[in-house]
Amino acid sequence: MTKNTADETKKTYTKQTYTKQTYTKQGAAGSTAREGARVMGTVLVTSGTGKTGRRVAERLAALGVPVRAGSRAGGVPVRAGSRAGGVPFDWQDESGWAAALDGTEAAYVAYYPDLAVPGAAGAMAAFGRVAAASGLRRVVLLSGRGEPQAAVAEEALRGARGEVELTVVRSAFFAQNFSEGALLDSVLGGELVFPAGSAAEPFLDIDDLADVVVAALTGDGHAGAVYELTGPRSLTFEEAAEELGRAAGRPVRYVPVSGPAYAEVLEGFGVSGPEAGFLAELFATLLDGHNSGTTDDVKRVLGREAKDFTAFTREAARDGAWHG
């Protein structure tokens, strides 16, 4: 899925601290980023308390970049001494966007709940107009790999942004979907119920995604680029369940189900009926094999290989993701 929906609903991601030292060691956008990010003005991170937004904000703050983390509540916890602060930002209330963008140089756009939902294209067009009027220099947009409707929303932003530089980051299915949220419960329960059939997916570690986003926000040479981010190899959900079980120290079995059956599972986790139906249909559509191929875009941007799924499972287990 675009992992935006998993980003903000009942899915995803491990909590990891991130320092300027570790960021510099791992690299971002080749040698330029390893030498340090270009000093720049304030960056707005929409959905700043979300799973990808939080990681992006942490990395920017670690590099000394002023961060404005947007959320509906507006109150974002900030580490002592950091240059990050919160600001109200609601995708359903356009009236606050100009204030959130005022004085910023760049923005990371992670649309809630997903770029494929009805209304997303209109929101992207509106945001593009506000961004252009605010004098914003650069936007990095999170999108979904192989999502036709997300591509429509991308184009809406592209057509309305004026002179604002745009980089699109299309993500494969997040590996961290298995370590937090609804799929965490499935792993803990020993049955990974999901409508993926036998299709393989090149699961992407969210930390790689965040590194790419930060590289595009803080470095030059990314304007106009569309990056399709994947892990280094593809696994079926059955294979992923086996690796999860080994790392977690408990048996995990993959149970393929239909889209409607999965919608019922989501409703059991408290997801509303319409949203559950949308998510189930989206998963069934995306996980039909057409996204199984891998890319080298993580390496192109960061100068290193993407993190393998096995490495993700070991790190998540070490951090206590499956101790419940």
Image (spheres, rainbow, N blue to C red):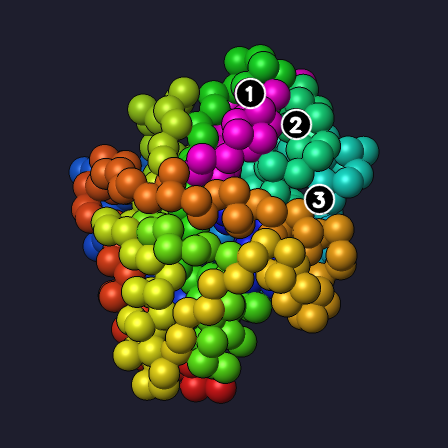
Q: Is residue 269 above or below residue 199?
A: below
Q: Viewed as shown, does residue 68 lie left or right of 96? A: left
The residue identified by callout 2 is 121
Give yes or no for residue 132 being in the magenta stretch: yes
Residue for point 29% across, 71% down: 243
Residue 244 visible somewhere in the drawing: yes
Tell me the distance, in whole angstroms, between the alpha carbons under discs 3 and 1: 22 Å
Q: Residue at x 71, y 44 (%)?
A: 89
> Mark 2: which amino acid?
Ala
**Image vertical order of residue 229 relative to residue 251, above or below:** above
The secondary element bearing badge 1 is classed as helix
Magenta extent = 130-156
Task: Say which label, 1 or 2, has the lower sequence index.
Answer: 2
* Residue picked out by circle 3: 89
Q: In screen coordinates, is 65 left or right of 238?
A: right
Spatial CA distance of label 3 from label 2 is 18 Å
How many residues crowd around disc 1 within 10 Å: few (fewer than 14), some, or many (20 or more)?
some
Q: Residue at coordinates 25% horizontally, 65% vertically from top-left?
A: 311
Image coordinates of residue 164 in percent, x first then y, are 53, 19
Mark 3 or 1: the one toward you? 1
- Residue name at image x 29 percent, y 40 percent: 293
Q: Earlier in the sequence, mark 3 or mark 2?
A: 3
Which residue type does callout 1 highlight?
A: Glu
Label 3 neighbourhood size at 10 Å, few (<14), some (14-19), many (20+)? Answer: many
Q: Residues within 10 Å of mark 2 (few under 14, many from 20)?
A: many
Asked if disc 1 and disc 2 are in contact, CB closer than 8 Å, the reply is yes
What secondary structure is marked by label 2?
helix
In the image, residue 193 lies at what x, y percent?
Answer: 51, 68
308 vs 304, nearest the viewer = 308
Mark pair 1, 2: CA separation: 8 Å
Residue 16: assigned label: none
